[in-house]
Each structure stands twice: as C-alpha cells, then as structure tokens.
Image (tube, coloured by chain):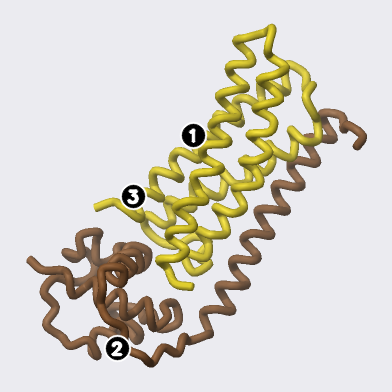
Chain colours: A brown, B yellow
Amino acid sequence: MKKLTEREALLFAFIVSCICLLATLGIAFAVGTALSGKQSQVTESRRFNSETVIQGRQVFVIHCVECHGFDARGDEGSDLHNLRSGDGLIHQIITGGIKGEMPGYGKVLNEADVRALIAYLRTLRN
Amino acid sequence: MDSIFWLRVHGGATHFPIALVFGAAFFETIGLLSSPRQHDFRIVSYWLLVSGGISSFGAVFSGLALSKWTVSGKSLLLQHHLFVWPAFALIVGLTSWRVAVGQSPSRRTFAIYLSLLATACALLAAAGFSGGELVLGR
C-alpha cells in the first residue's frame, strides 16, 4: 500500500472517524427505532431470582434514576420503597405511565425487563 | 438476549480498548524516552493502537445493545455517552491516521498525535468511570 502524505493521512483519518461514528449512531438509531415498535411476547411467568433482581437494577439505573434517584428514595418521582400495590398495577404503571406525572415505558422495555424491574422494586425495603 | 447477557459482554468487551489504547500511549511515551529502542516501542504501540481501535467497535456495539440502542439517554447514561462518543471517534481517527501515515510521522505531527492519544485516554477513563458508576454504583 502506498504511504500517504501527512496531510492526506489526516484527511483520511478524519473521514474514517466521521464515517464510523455516523454509521454507528445510524445503526443504533435504526435498530432502536425498529425494536421500539416490537413488543416482546413473554407469557410464561418468571421466578424472581437474584439474576432477575440484578437485571431489574440495571433497568432501573438506565431508565428510572433520573426521576426516582439512585437510591429509589424519590426525587422528581416518588419513593419506591415498600410498594404496597400489586404486581399487575405496578406493571401497568411502568408500561403505561401516569398521565402528567410519569411517561410509559411499554415501548422501551420488553416484558422480561418489566418483570425484572418489578422484582427489583420488591427488594426495596426500609 | 436480555440485559444481563449484554451487561456481561459489555463489561468484558470494554476492557480491551481501555487496556490496549492505554498500552499504546504507554509504549509511545517509553519510546520517546528511550531513543535507542524507539522504533521497537513504536511498533508495539502501533499494533496496540490498531487492536484497540478494532476492539472499540465490540465495546461500543455491546454497549448499544445493553442500553437498547440508546445513543444519548438521561442522567449517568447520558454522561457516559458524552465521554464514549468523542473517545470512540478519536480512537478510530487516531488508528486510521497511524495506519495511513505508517511508522515515520514528522516530529510536529507526532507530538499532536501523542497529545490526542492522551486526550483519548482521558476520555476513555472518564467513560469507564461513569460506566462503572452506572452499573455498580450506589
């Protein structure tokens, strides 16, 4: 391969860098858009084991800490310790949201993530 | 494949570009200080950087899969991404430049390259720290 001059090499590197960054962001955007419309159909209930709780914590950190805080003690959102509502209602709130208060995550999270998040929330006790 | 799978893959994959790019910067610096063996150290640094550049794709794509293909996000995830994207672009750019220009850049451009490599290391460290906080913190 013929060696490039330094100026040509700089231009080459800049173009490659831009292409890779834009391609990565483009792929992420395309896949993210495609996945957001796809609802996972998980019908079988899943036992809440420690892995599920860890997964729930990840989901919580990625999607919920903004409003509920890292310790889930509430910030803009409410304190999530000692929830007394049933799993069904919590599931509905997570996926459908609360009008004017909380966005729904039904299109962002799949069924496994929602169940894991509920499992994690159940571990939050005073 | 669920979040746990991608969490493990991302947790493993991110260490490759971090270690390799830091290694490249280290050997480049050692090469500057050791003039008789500078050429050898530069070759080692060159291949470390190339490996780091290639492995950065694995780290980035596993991270995207983990975050459900979110390129920005909120809170700590946003902070993590604000470090990740410039670091990724810089590493790919530096690798491409190094491959294109070969082993004999001029002193001036090599100094610029070294300072950009140090910047990439700083961005990688910040991205790694915020990523660790995101997964393991509090």
Q: Secondary structure at mark 3?
A: helix
Q: Residue B133: give its label.
A: 3
**Chain at tag 2:** A
Where residue A10 sits in the image (x, y, percent)?
Answer: 77, 35
Pointer 2 local density, CA inside 10 Å: few below 14, some 14–19, many at least 20 = some
Work out whether residue B93 or residue B24 is closer to the camera in this orientation and state it: B24
Residue at which label 2 appears? A92
The span from disc 1 to disc 3 (Cα, nearest Å) is 16 Å
Give SS at disc 2. Answer: helix
The reply to whether label 2 and label 1 mark residues of one chain is no
Residue B126, located in which quarter of the rendered image? top left
Looking at the rendered structure, whether the residues under marks 1 and 3 are on a common chain is answered as yes
Q: Is residue B102 left or right of residue A79?
A: right
Q: Which residue is mark 1?
A: B122
* Quarter of the figure that contains the N terminus of chain A: top right
Q: Nearer the viewer, residue B103 or A46?
A: A46
Q: Would you place residue B36 above or below residue B89 in this image?
A: above
Q: Is residue A64 visible?
A: no
Residue B69: mark: none
CA distance for labels 2 and 3: 29 Å
Asked if residue B20 lies left or right of residue A13, the reply is: left
Q: Residue at x 27, y 78 (%)?
A: A101
Residue displayed at 34% across by 86% down: A96
Name the subunit of mark 3. B
Q: Secondary structure at mark 1?
A: helix
Q: Visible in this render: residue A17?
A: yes
Which residue sits at x=68%, y=33%?
B47
Chain containing the residue with disc 1? B
Q: Residue furthest left?
A: A126
Residue depicted at 14% across the width and 78% down the height: A83
